[in-house]
Amino acid sequence: MKAAITATGKYLPPDKLTNKDFEKIIDTTDEWIQSRTGIRERRILKDPTKATAFMCAEAAKEVLERRGVSAEDIDLIIVATISPDMFFPSTACLVQDLIGAKNAWGFDLSGACSGFLYALVTGAKFIETGMHQKILVLGGDKMSTIVDYSDRNNCILFGDAAAGVLLEPAKDGYGVLDARLYSDGTAGKNHLYMLGSGSLNPPTHDTVDKKMHYLFQDGKVVFKSAVIGMADVAAEMMTRNSLTAVDVAYLVPHQANLRIIAATAERMGIGMDKVAVNIDKYGNTTAATLPLCLDELNLEGNLADGDNLILVSYGAGYTWGGVFVKWQSI
Ligand code: COA
């Protein structure tokens, strides 16, 4: 028995940070950002008393409401994030409290931009073994707390959001049918990281002065790896599952850069009309991008029973992967 995605939901903070806003704080232009990345604006959670757990809980509430399921029916909560409210308790435990999922257990998963894909596959396995019937898989990041707004190379890329799905046992032939997940710490460790705040460089005045509590990315190097990695894994998913371009209803890619997304679509031989794109509105929301895309496709009524979806991601680690989902309309 496989796991079907039976509901989706999201939380988007109300405040927008546009490219024009960036023109006032760093040396950049709307034209540069749009042409290099495809991003026009992103959402920022300005309220300092709210963070990733709040956004994930709001997304979870929407998932439950759409499916008409009570929080008490949830068996497991998995939260993919690299910006947890705190190291412990886990964001999953904070979400459990906020939504009242008192019969669930849960944990956080750190997979950066591939976090949701890793969490989706992990959750699916608990359904496949028969251990659980209802699993919330959430991806959320308050990236604005780890982005250096004086670093023009990176600050324009990221936004805040959370989104998620409900996993339940699928009908025969439906659900999460195949996955390939990868990591390469050797290639990835020097190009995309946050040095401070962990046990190697615990916070001190010195680490803060050196801005080690902020994300660092060598964009050009990561871009080159991401273009190859995401396109390769998308092609691999098609080959493994004997899918041609016409068989694919939608490519649902991580939203890091529109040029990486377009290169992946080209490699698959599909037009951009079959690609979920919302990077223009939200930027890179790290663990939230894939469920955000799924939720938009779902809400707009674009997903039909039996549709073949290919989900792909690439991010810090490096981490990357692909998942093949046969969509089940409930
Ligand atoms: N506004 C204007 N100029 C900027 C800028 C900004 N916000 N940020 C950087 N620049 C400058 C740089 O200083 C550099 O100038 P230099 O050539 O004088 O040193 C130049 O623009 C770089 O331009 P270009 O080579 O055209 O950029 P790019 O095509 O490499 O695009 C990124 C830059 C960051 C958008 C791109 O590399 C990227 O998206 N990287 C990876 C993202 C990713 O996939 N992450 C993985 C998951 S998170």
Image: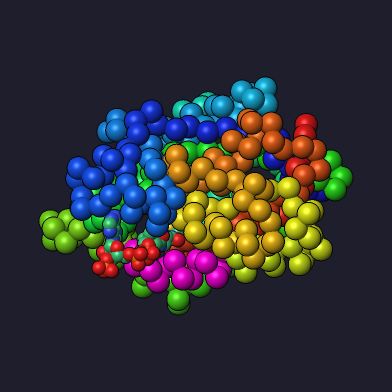
Residue 209: name its quadrant.
bottom left
Q: Main secondary structure of the magenta part?
A: helix
Tell me which residue sits at (44%, 33%) in the image.
12
The answer to whether residue 135 is seen in the rendering is yes
The answer to whether residue 195 is seen in the rendering is no
Counting from the top left corner in percent of width and height, residue 249 is at 73, 47
Tell me which residue sits at (29%, 33%) in the image.
46
Residue 165: name its quadrant.
top right
Tell me which residue sits at (80%, 38%) in the image.
305
Q: Is residue 305 above or below residue 184?
A: above
Q: Quadrant of ligand 1?
A: bottom left
Counting from the top left corner in percent of width and height, residue 89 is at 41, 43
Counting from the top left corner in percent of width and height, residue 60 is at 54, 32
Q: Is residue 226 magenta?
A: yes
Counting from the top left corner in percent of width and height, residue 166 is at 65, 37
Name the one closer to the observer, 213 or 102: 213
Q: Is residue 41 above or below residue 116?
A: above
Check the picture and name the quadrant holding the C terminus.
Answer: top right
